[in-house]
Image (spheres, rainbow, N blue to C red):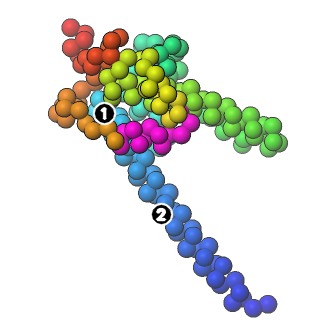
């Protein structure tokens, strides 16, 4: 059999692989840059953590809550700050279901449903809290809750929101942790303690 027939297929496969790697690299750069911008908009000092894919969720959570306080998700549900800060470790459950299960269709479907549910609740809640801080709205603002829920399933929605949001004047200088109070007013955390 003549190998000349396979040469175009091999070349196409190699070119497609290089193009796919380039697209993945550009998507990684864009998403890390936008996560870092979102953390900066929320007042985080160390936004470099956004460039580490595993720890970017921890960085997002850290800039939206303080240690020891209960966190209000979607303006209704209270969650302990430890569970909220470490929610991304819960994604190991569906990973373990997929890798240590017997690979039947029920286990696979259940694992994907669990992963989507965890992302919807916690990643969506994190995006919602970030949007509340950025927009200076109260925790029960419907627009931010809707965008946060959508961002929990499709994170690119949150990244686009970070992209189109300009830096406010109070964040252009020093790093400040600015949380909206119960009325949605932006209050510097240090000034609030006094």
Q: Earlier in the sequence, mark 2 or mark 1?
A: 2
Q: Nearer the viewer, residue 101 or 123?
A: 123
Which residue extends farthest top?
194
The residue furthest front is 143
Query: Principal SS element in the magenta part?
Result: helix
Look at the image and say whether residue 160 sits in the magenta stretch. yes
Query: Position of 90 compared to 43: left or right?
Result: right
At which x and y percent is residue 15?
55, 73
Numbered mark located on residue 22 in the image? 2
Q: Which residue is mark 1?
A: 41
Residue at 33% over, 27% down: 135
Contact (Cβ within 8 Å) of mark 2 with mark 1:
no
User: Is 26 or 141 nearer to us in this picture?
Assistant: 141
Residue 123, position as x, y percentages in the image: 51, 31
Image spot of residue 173 (x, y percent): 17, 33
Viewer can see residue 88: no
User: In what quadrant of the picture does the N terminus appear?
Assistant: bottom right
Helix, strand or loop under label 1? helix
Quarter of the figure with residue 98: top right
Q: CA distance from mark 2 to mark 1?
A: 29 Å
Residue shown at the point (19%, 32%) measured from the top left: 169
Range of magenta residues: 152-163
Horizontal side of 3 relative to 20 (left or right) equals: right
Residue at image position (33%, 29%) is: 134
């Amino acid at each position: 059999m003549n190998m000349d027939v396979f040469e175009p297929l091999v070349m196409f496969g190699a070119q497609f692989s290089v193009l796919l790697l380039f697209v993945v690299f550009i998507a990684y750069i864009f998403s890390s840059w936008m996560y870092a911008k979102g953390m900066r908009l929320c007042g985080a000092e160390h936004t470099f953590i956004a460039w580490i894919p595993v720890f970017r969720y921890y960085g997002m959570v850290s800039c939206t809550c303080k240690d020891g306080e209960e966190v209000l998700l979607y303006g209704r549900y209270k969650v302990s700050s430890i569970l909220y800060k470490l929610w991304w470790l819960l994604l190991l459950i569906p990973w373990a279901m997929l890798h240590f299960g017997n690979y039947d269709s029920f286990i696979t479907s259940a694992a994907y449903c669990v992963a989507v549910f965890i992302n919807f609740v916690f990643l969506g809640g994190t995006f919602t809290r970030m949007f509340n801080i950025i927009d200076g709205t109260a925790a029960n603002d419907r627009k931010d809750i809707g965008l946060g829920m959508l961002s929990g399933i499709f994170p690119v929605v949150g990244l686009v929101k970070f992209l189109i949001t300009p830096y406010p004047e109070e964040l252009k200088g020093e790093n400040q942790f600015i949380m909206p109070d119960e009325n949605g007013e932006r209050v510097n955390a240090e000034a609030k303690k006094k």
